[in-house]
Image (cartoon, rainbow, N blue to C red):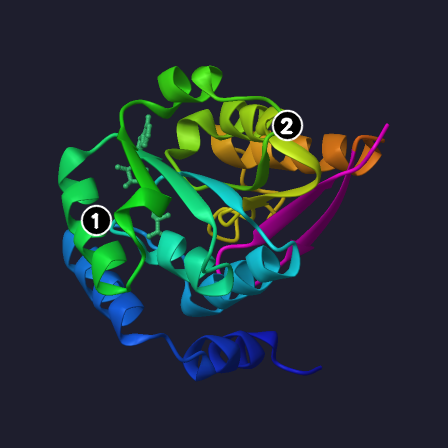
Amino acid sequence: MPSKELSWKYVEETTVEPDVIARARAQSVEQGIDAVSPATGAQLALLCGAVDAQSIIEIGTGLGVSGLWMLNGAPHAHLTSIDLEADHHEVARTAFTDAGHPAARVRLITGRALEVLPRMNEASYDVVLVDGDAANILDYIAHAIRLVRVGGLVLVPHALWRDFVPEPAKRDGVTAQLRGLLRELRDSPAVRIAVSPVGDGLLQILTVPE
Ligand SMILES: C[S@@+](CC[C@H](N)C(=O)[O-])C[C@H]1O[C@@H](n2cnc3c(N)ncnc32)[C@H](O)[C@@H]1O
């Protein structure tokens, strides 16, 4: 039986992060912010590039790691990123500028995601990344599916929740919600899904015409 752990370690360790992202990651570690893993970031970049993303929403800016990766893959996209913490946005803003992304293409909205998301236009975005607080993850995903265009992607980088989702004995609220969500999405005619075990489990939801 091949060691999956070894493979996961290998892909994380061999992913090369641009310096500006490596700096944002180091700051995230210092501040205890759970940034997407390097291999998850590389996958986000590839997916944003593959759908030729022009407009991206991110729920949970942190210090910019995931946003920088997505813009790395789709450098001409407009990113709207929401976070509760103004301090996070101050640091992230510097990182986006250092990476050469014009301020006009990076909109940082400081506020509670559940208050901001209802004001956004339906079916208008190419990619929505869901990486805010776990307590509201189902509501965020419902908003994300509403906001993304047909043929767009909703990406959820903590979908296997600390390896709890595959572990039947784990029955805490977030884990149970994610298990239920995965079952529901598998049966939904409105979406196609794939779950990659990269990082903390990357759920990829593609919206399809009904
Ligand atoms: C897991 S971190 C995001 C990490 C980031 N995506 C990255 O890869 O660098 C979650 C972020 O969600 C933010 N957050 C927590 N509750 C929130 C809420 N109700 N609305 C918006 N953002 C929230 C936190 O301040 C934190 O920066």
x and y percentages locating residue 42 in the rendered image: 49, 67
Q: Residue at x 45, y 78 (%)?
A: 15
Q: Is residue 32 visible from the viewing direction of this image?
A: no
Q: Which residues are magenta?
A: 191-210
| Residue type at the position of mark 1 | Arg
x and y percentages locating residue 125 in the rendered image: 57, 36
User: In the shown orientation, is residue 204 left or right of residue 71?
Assistant: right
Q: Is residue 37 visible from the viewing direction of this image?
A: yes
Whether residue 18 is in magenta: the answer is no
**Residue at the disc numbered 1:** 93
**Residue at the disc numbered 2:** 123
Classify mark 2 as within 8 Å of ligand 1 or not, answering yes or no: no
User: In the shown orientation, is residue 169 left or right of residue 26?
Assistant: right
x and y percentages locating residue 198 in the rendered image: 55, 63
Looking at the picture, does residue 142 appear above or below residue 98? above
x and y percentages locating residue 77 in the rendered image: 47, 50
Q: Residues within 10 Å of mark 2 (few under 14, many from 20)?
A: some
Q: Quadrant of the C terminus?
A: top right
Q: Quadrant of the N terminus?
A: bottom right
For label 2, the SS is loop
Q: Please tell me which of labels 2 and 1 falls first in the chain.
A: 1
Q: Residue at x 55, y 54 (%)?
A: 201
| Residue type at the position of mark 2 | Ala
Q: Residue at x 41, y 44 (%)?
A: 79
Looking at the picture, does residue 111 appear above or below residue 51? above
Quarter of the rendering containing residue 138:
top right
For label 1, the SS is helix
